[in-house]
Amino acid sequence: MSGWKPGFSESMPDTMAPPTPSSSGQVRAVGALPETIPALFVQQAQVLKTKPLFLVKRGEAYQPIAWEQVARDVDAFSAFLMSHAVMSSDRVLLWMENRPEWGIADLGVQSIGAWT
């Protein structure tokens, strides 16, 4: 899936841009429903906004990735999937090593109602 880069949603072309935040300014996952894993993630992201969710090793130091950045990346990946005709009930294979992008991709897939 070339073209999608986590953490770089600001530089994405309009066709891959995440949905606009709600009028309250809160980030939401595409298609999130109450009592789903994506909905619970969104609730946590709204509460924990700037707190770190992931720590990623860059060189010799660990860099934090905040909940709100991950929520934006989930939205961006969800929009990317929909722009490539992935629909609710489709199955998506995630093939990558254990890294933050796996969780972001998995939540993005779930957010549109597809399966991993």
Image (cartoon, helix red, strand yellow):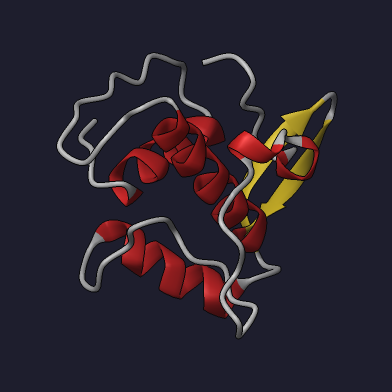
Looking at the picture, does residue 70 appear above or below residue 67? above
Left or right of 7, for residue 54: left
Percent coordinates x, y for residue 51 in the rendering: 67, 67
Looking at the picture, does residue 63 appear above or below residue 99? below
- Find the residue positioned furthest to the left: 89
Q: Quadrant of the C terminus?
A: top left
- Find the residue positioned furthest to the bottom: 24
In the image, what residue occupies the spot 61% across and 85% down?
24
Which residue occupies the foreground of this view, 2 or 50? 2
Place residue 7 in its image quadrant: top right
Percent coordinates x, y for residue 65 in the rendering: 69, 50
Which residue occupies the foreground of this view, 72 or 80? 80
In the image, what residue occupies the spot 44% across and 67% down?
42
In the image, what residue occupies the spot 64% across and 20% down?
3
Left or right of 99, for residue 108: left
Count of numbered tags? 0
Which residue occupies the foreground of this view, 46 or 65? 46
Percent coordinates x, y for residue 113 in the rendering: 23, 46
Place residue 6 in its image quadrant: top right
Left or right of 113, for residue 84: right
Left or right of 79, for residue 34: left
Percent coordinates x, y for residue 50 in the rendering: 71, 68
In the image, what residue occupies the spot 38% across and 14% down?
95
- Find the residue positioned furthest to the right: 60
